[in-house]
Image: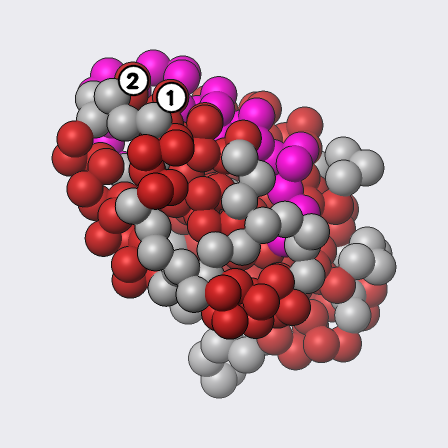
């Protein structure tokens, strides 16, 4: 079992880079200044040395340090399409992090791990739907970022189509939200979907486009093929 302290001791940071990262991410937490390739290499070693239960425990402990690189690493540790056994422990941990999201980089790495667990068990969308009415902006945003895999299906099955329509319903409830990150998330979802299902995106924009912020509407339509 690798402890969080042991894992962090393996990371060699750069104080100047740490200061730059703090200014860029604007979240009030410690930064080590570790380059992403170095973090990826360390996580790869930790994954190989741990059982699934140990990985989950390490991810939880790393997250609790509140260090930027530790939280990024926590998400990376749990980013895997198939977990054996795929019980609820990894998903429950990822979902428990959502209320503490406060910056896009940490939120997105954790959300990528969450995407894998949602695809593995789409019934978890029921829980994600409860996030869409949260007062916490990053929780609302996570509902769309974690469901991005449903934008990438060229030949969706009926259940997958139903899930896509369900998530588009969540996006529709966001179009009047003034938060930039929410508008950006709606645009991101629609833009990615447009590469696989342009008619659905055109229908959404025809119905809701005027309510969206101009930048979000433009971004949502950027990959639509010519009519």
Report helix, strand or loop for mark 2.
Answer: helix
What residue range appears in magenta? 81-103
Binning the other alpha carbons within 10 Å of mark 2 as few (below 14), some (14 to 19) or many (20 upward) gives few
Q: Which residue is mark 2?
A: 53
In reply to whether residue 97 is colored magenta, the answer given is: yes
Q: Residues within 10 Å of mark 1 (few under 14, many from 20)?
A: many
Extreme residue in the left direction? 48
44 left or right of 12? Answer: left
Relative depth, front residue between 157 and 216: 216
Measured in 3D between alpha carbons, the distance from the residue under mark 1 to the one under mark 2, in whole angstroms, is 6 Å
* Residue depicted at 34% across the width and 56% down the height: 12
In the visual, does 53 lie left or right of 179?
left
Where does label 1 land, which residue?
57
In the rendered image of this protein, does residue 208 appear above or below residue 86?
A: below
Q: Which label is found at residue 112?
A: none
User: Mark 1 near mark 2, Cβ–Cβ under 8 Å?
Assistant: yes
């Amino acid at each position: 079992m690798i402890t969080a302290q042991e894992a962090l001791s393996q990371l060699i940071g750069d104080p100047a880079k740490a200061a730059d990262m703090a200014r860029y991410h604007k979240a009030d937490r410690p930064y080590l200044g570790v380059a992403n390739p170095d973090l990826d290499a360390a996580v790869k070693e930790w994954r190989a040395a741990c059982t699934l239960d140990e990985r989950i425990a390490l991810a939880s402990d790393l997250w609790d340090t509140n260090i930027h690189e530790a939280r990024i690493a926590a998400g990376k540790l749990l980013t895997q399409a198939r977990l054996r056994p795929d019980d609820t422990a990894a998903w429950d941990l990822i979902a428990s992090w959502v209320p503490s999201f406060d910056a896009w980089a940490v939120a997105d790495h954790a959300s990528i791990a969450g995407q894998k667990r949602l695809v593995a068990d789409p019934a978890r969308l029921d829980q994600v739907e409860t996030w869409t009415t949260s007062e916490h902006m990053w929780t609302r945003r996570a509902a769309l970022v974690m469901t991005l895999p449903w934008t990438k299906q060229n030949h969706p099955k009926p259940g997958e189509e139903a899930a896509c329509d369900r998530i588009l319903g969540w996006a529709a409830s966001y179009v009047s939200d003034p938060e930039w990150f929410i508008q950006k998330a709606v645009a991101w979802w629609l833009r990615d979907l447009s590469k696989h299902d342009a008619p659905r995106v055109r229908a959404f924009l025809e119905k809701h486009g005027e309510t969206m912020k101009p930048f979000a509407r433009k971004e949502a339509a950027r990959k639509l093929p010519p009519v």
